[in-house]
Amino acid sequence: MDVALLLCGLAVGVLVVTAVAERIDVPAPFLLIAVGVAASYAPQVPQVYLDHDVVLLGLLPPLLYAAAQQTSLVDFNTNRRPILLLSIGLVIFTAVGVAVVVHWLLPGVSWAVALALGAVVAPPDAVAATAIGRRIGLPRRIVTILEGESLLNDATALVLLRTALAAAAGTGLDAWGVSLDFVVAAGGGVLVGVLFYVVVAWVRRMLGDPVLESALSLVVPFAAYLAAEEVHASGVLAVVVAGLLLGHRAPVLQTAQSRIAERLNWRTVAFVLENAVFLLIGLQAWWIVEGAAESDLGAGRIAAVCAAVLAAVVVLRMMWVFPARYLIVRPGADPDTGSVPPWTYTFLLGWAGMRGVVTLAAAFVLPEDTEYREVLLLAALTVVAGTLFLQGTTLPWLARRLQVPSPDPAEDALARATLLQQASKAALHELDQLEYDDRHGAVDLIRQRLDQRNFAAWERLATVEGQESPSDLYARVRLATLAAERRRVLEIRSSGSVPADVVADVLAMLDVEESMLDVAAEERRELRASAGTRRTGLTCADLEQYPAVETPEDPECQSCLEEGTHWVALRQCLACGRIGCCDSSPGRHATAHFHETSHPVMQSAEPGEDWRWCYVHHTTG
C-alpha cells in the first residue's frame, strides 16, 4: 500500500508541477528538481532511494525508445560524424579528464574508481537535451545532433563504467580487453536491435490491429534491452537501433490508425516518465547530502570536489567540440539556411550538455565499499543539478544573445505546402493511369478535396490582412457545426436508442476531424508572428532563371477588380510582372495567367513573403 501511495503521489506531483511550470512559463525540469529537493527535506514525505536497476531496466528503455522513434533516421545519418564524435569520443575524453581531476583531489581514490565516476558523469541526458532544446527553439541541426548523441552516449558510458568497475575489482583488464569489450557490446547491441526490428516488422504485418500493435510496442524496448544484456551486449544500443528502424519504417509497416494510436501512447508514456525522472532526481538530495556530510573529509574539500567535477564536464565538452568541428567534421551548408553553420552553433552545442537520471543511476552502481562513495554520489548529483540549472537556464539567453535562429514556422509552412503539392501531383498522375467507370463523380470529388487541402496549406502562409481566408472560414464554421453534431449525438446516446459502440465510433470520427482543424489553427497562429527567409531545399532550372524582384506597392489583381470578386492572396509573374490572385481565390487568375502564357515562375506579392513557385516543376525557392 505504501508503494502504491508513493507512486500515486509521484504521478500527481508530476502533473501539478508540470501544469504550474507551463502557467508561469518555466521549463518543467527545473521546477520538478527544485520541488523534489524541497520535498526530500520535508518530514512528511517518505524517503525515496532510487535503485539503479529501476532506472536502467524500468525507465531508460522506454525513454530511449520513445526518443528514437521520434528521431529522423535520415537526419541522424546526415549528421552521423558529429554524433559519433560526441557519443563515443567525447564520452571517453570526459571520463578520462574527470578521472584525472578526482584522483588529484582525492588521492585515496584509485584510478579505476576515478575513471568509473568519469564514466558516470560523462554522458548528457536524452531527456534533458530534447526537453530543453526543443522548448527554446534551437536550430534543428543542433537538436538532431543532441538527440543522436544522447541516444548513443549512454551505451559508451555504461560499457566504460562496467570496464572500470571490473578493473577496480582486480580483474586487471588491459587496453585490448577494454577495446574488445566495447566492440562486442556495441556490435552485439546493434545486431540485437536489427533482429528485433525484423521480428517486430514481420509481426506487425500479421496483426493490423491498432490495439495489439500498441501493446506490442510497449514490450519492444524492455525485451530488446534484456535480450541484449543477456548476451553481454549493449541494451541501450539495441533499444535505440530498434526504435530508429521501426520509427523510420512505420509509414510502411503500420496502418494509419496504428500509427496514430502508437504515437499518442508513446507521447503519454514519455511525458509521464520524463517528468517523473526529474522529480526523482530532486528527491535523492537529502540522503545523498547527509551521507556525504558523514564523510571524514571536510565540507570545504567536499565542495571543492563537487565544484571541480562540475567545472570539468563543462570545460572538457567545450575543449572537444571546437577542435572536432574545425579539424574533423567541417560541416557543409545547412539545408535550412543554405550557409555553413557559424561558430555560435558549435558554442551552443557545447553548452547544451545537461546531465540527467542516467548519471545518477549509474553512480549508484558504485560498490558500497568504494572509498568516499558518498562524496562521489554527491559529485554526480551536483553535476546533474548543476548542468541543468547552470546550462539549462542560460541556454535560451545565450541563443538570443548569439542571435541563433530558431526554426521558422513560415519556413515549415512553405515546405509543407510544397510537399503536399508534390504529393497531389503524384495522386493526379495516378488518377490518370487508373481505369474506372466514374458514373457518380467520385474522381471530381477527389480532385476537389486535393485542391482544398493544397489551398489550405498555401493559405497558412499569407492572405490579405484583416480578411478571413477560406480555410479559416471553413475551420470556424466547421468547428461550430461539429459542436452541434456532437451535442445531438450525446442526446441520442442519453436516450439509449443506439448501441454504445456505434455512438463511440461516431464520436471518434468527429474527434479526428476536429483535431485536424485544431492543429491547423494552432499553426496559423504561430505563422502570424513569424518572418524570415525560407528555403525548401528544392530548385529547378526555371527558378534559377527567374530570381525574385521587388513587388509593387499596393498590388492589385486587375482581373478580380474587373469581375467584382475578392482575392485571398496575390502572386506576381516573374516573366511579365502581372499580378494575379492565388488558387484559393475565386478567380485563380495567377494560374490562369500561367496557362495562357506558359510563364513558369511566380512569386508571392504578399508583405513579408519571399518565396517563388514554379508551375512547371512544382517546386519553391
Image: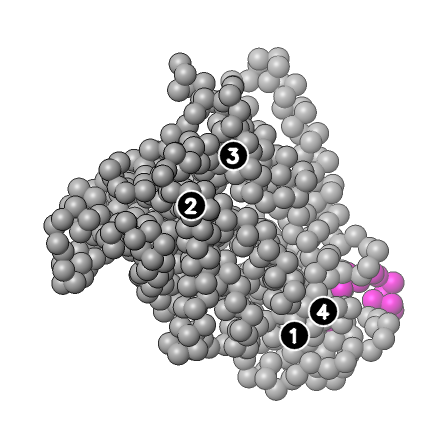
Quadrant of residue 509 within the rendered picture: top right
583 lies above or below 14: below
Mark 4–mark 1 distance (CA, rounded to whole Å): 9 Å
Please identify, in this view, whether the residue under mark 2 or under mark 3 is nearer the observer: 2
Give, as a three-letter code, the residue at label 2: Ile
Q: Is residue 487 above or below residue 198?
A: above
* Above or below: residue 259 compared with residue 619: above
Label 4: which residue? 609
> Residue at the location (55% across, 31% down)?
38
Magenta stretch, residue numbers:
560-571
Residue identified by numbered label 1: 612
Q: Residue at x 43, y 68 (%)?
A: 319
Left or right of 222 in this view: 312? right
Screen quadrant of the C terminus: bottom right
Closer to viewer: mark 2 or mark 1:
2
* Amino acid type shown at disc 4: Glu
| Lower position in the chain sequence, tag 2 or tag 1 | 2
Q: Residues within 10 Å of mark 3 (few under 14, many from 20)?
A: some
Residue at the disc numbered 3: 37
Q: CA distance from mark 2 to mark 1?
A: 62 Å
Magenta segment includes 562: yes
Amino acid type, callout 1: Arg
- Mark carried by residue 302: 2
Q: 10 Å neighbourhood of mark 4: few (<14), some, or many (≥20)?
A: some
Q: Cα distance, mark 4 to mark 2? A: 58 Å
Identify the residue at image location x=65%, y=62%.
400
For the point 32% across and 41% down, the residue is: 373
